[in-house]
Amino acid sequence: MLNTLNMLVIQFVTLASGIAFRADSWKQTLPALVIGMIGIFLVIGIIILATYGLNKFFSRKKGEGDE
């Protein structure tokens, strides 16, 4: 029953939006998704490392600059 309902909803959405639904499209899009997610994590990692490095480079030592 639930599977039939899901199929009806998918049919309605695809007919209403004019977009064709292909069940096997994940085989083509999954590699692009994985590469994109790896890229996102790499960029976030680089930003974290750059922030950490800049904090270490520009941070003042205790007692330095105090009057």
Image (cartoon, rainbow, N blue to C red):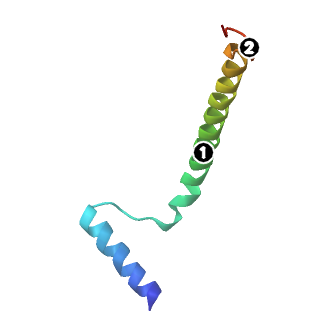
> Could you tell me which residue is drawn at 62 percent across and 29 percent down?
47
Q: Is residue 50 above or below residue 37?
A: above
Q: How many marks?
A: 2
> Could you tell me which residue is drawn at 37 percent across and 73 percent down?
10
The spot of residue 30 in percent (x, y) is 59, 54
The spot of residue 14 in percent (x, y) is 32, 67
Q: Is residue 7 above or below residue 61?
A: below
Q: Which residue is mark 2?
A: 63
Q: Which residue is mark 1?
A: 37
The residue lying toward the viewer, choosing from 47 and 16, is 47
Q: CA distance from mark 1 to mark 2?
A: 43 Å
The spot of residue 62 in percent (x, y) is 75, 17
The residue lying toward the viewer, choosing from 2 and 48, is 48
Q: Is residue 3 above or below residue 31?
A: below
Residue 65 lies in quadrant: top right
* Amino acid on which disc 2 is placed: Gly
Left/right of residue 38 with respect to residue 6 in the rendered view: right
Residue sticking out furthest to the front: 67
* Amino acid on which disc 1 is placed: Met
